[in-house]
Image: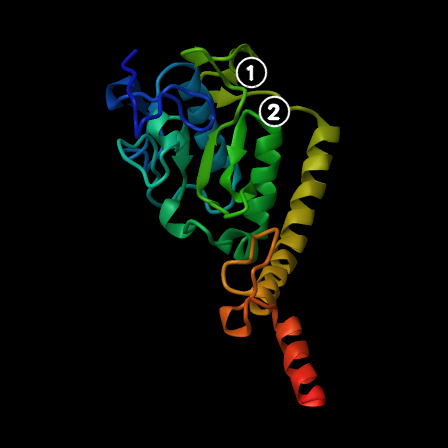
Amino acid sequence: MSFRTAYGNTHSENGWRMVNRDECALIQGLAFMDTAPVRKGWAFEALSAFAHWYDQNVPGEIVSATWGWSNTNDVSTSNHLSGTALDINAPQYPWGGDRMAREFPARVAAIRRGLTEFEGIIFWGADWSRKDEMHFQLNSGTAKGDGASDRLIDFVRRRIVDGQLKGSVGKTALDAAKVNAFTQVFMGPIGSDTKDVREQLCGIGSRDAGEYDGWGQLGNRTVTDGLGAVLDRVVNR
């Protein structure tokens, strides 16, 4: 195995060892995969099957560039550095945006169903606080030592045949996935609007913060406190 250290890290965020390009292979049978090397072995089996499932089941299919392993990355522990992540239809869904949730809710619902069918083996970047709708990676718990965990090996052996996902987790789990997808599509815009309002009231950079420093122009007060201070001076001067 051709391991490496990237930015001082031997492992990426999901626990997989960093590897060189020669330990990756290209997914076959799909367009736009020539820029998406994926780590060989059990990781390849799972990610390749997910890419095929996505192309067959998510409305819109795979119709633009997809990215995989990378030698460098803006994130020092990125799972692209270990060859265990795919950015599917990357140009369509910029990092930090929510275009899919806003414009293509049916795609979100289909992906939620797919994540359930893959039994949590795959993690979707849309679930990060800074959304990354193009990004799919092997989840935490899929790596062990220098390779795959028993959980990942068991899943691949049970559910993947000839590179395709087989069988189903069952109706109950899929119904739960549908509810989750509906909730995210419905609540997502509300959460975004709330963050916009929070930033207006509490200062730039407070969209995802737990504590708010306020606006420097107002002596680090929030808008409400700043207005209160002004009124107090007017009334009591």
Q: Give the class, few, some or many, for how many residues have Cα within 10 Å of label 1's Cα (few <14, many ≥20).
A: some
Which disc number belongs to residue 119?
A: 2
Q: Position of residue 26 (x, y in %)?
A: 31, 26
Q: Which residue is drawn at the image coordinates 28% and 20% (left, top)?
A: 4
Residue wearing tag 1? 155
Locate the C terminus by quadrant: bottom right
| Res 171 visible | yes
Above or below, comparing residue 130 to residue 36 in the picture: below
Q: Image quadrant of residue 72?
A: top left
* Most foreground residue, 25 or 23: 23
* Most foreground residue, 123 or 8: 8
Is residue 29 left or right of 161 when viewed as pictured?
Answer: left
| Amino acid type indicated by mark 2 | Glu
Q: Position of residue 218 (x, y in %)?
A: 55, 73
Mark 2 near mark 1, Cβ–Cβ under 8 Å? yes
* Most foreground residue, 107 or 150: 150
Q: Position of residue 207 (x, y in %)?
A: 55, 57
Q: Secondary structure at mark 2?
A: loop
Q: Position of residue 64 (x, y in %)?
A: 35, 45
> Most extreme residue toward the left, as rendered?
22
Is residue 33 left or right of 115 when viewed as pictured?
Answer: left
| Amino acid type indicated by mark 1 | Phe
> Most extreme residue toward the right, as rendered?
172
Q: Give the class, few, some or many, for how many residues have Cα within 10 Å of label 2's Cα (few <14, many ≥20).
A: some
Cα–Cα span, label 2 and label 1: 8 Å
Mark 2 or mark 1: whose residue is earlier in sequence = 2
* Most foreground residue, 44 or 127: 127
Q: Image quadrant of residue 45?
A: top left
Locate the N terminus by quadrant: top left
Which disc number belongs to residue 3?
A: none
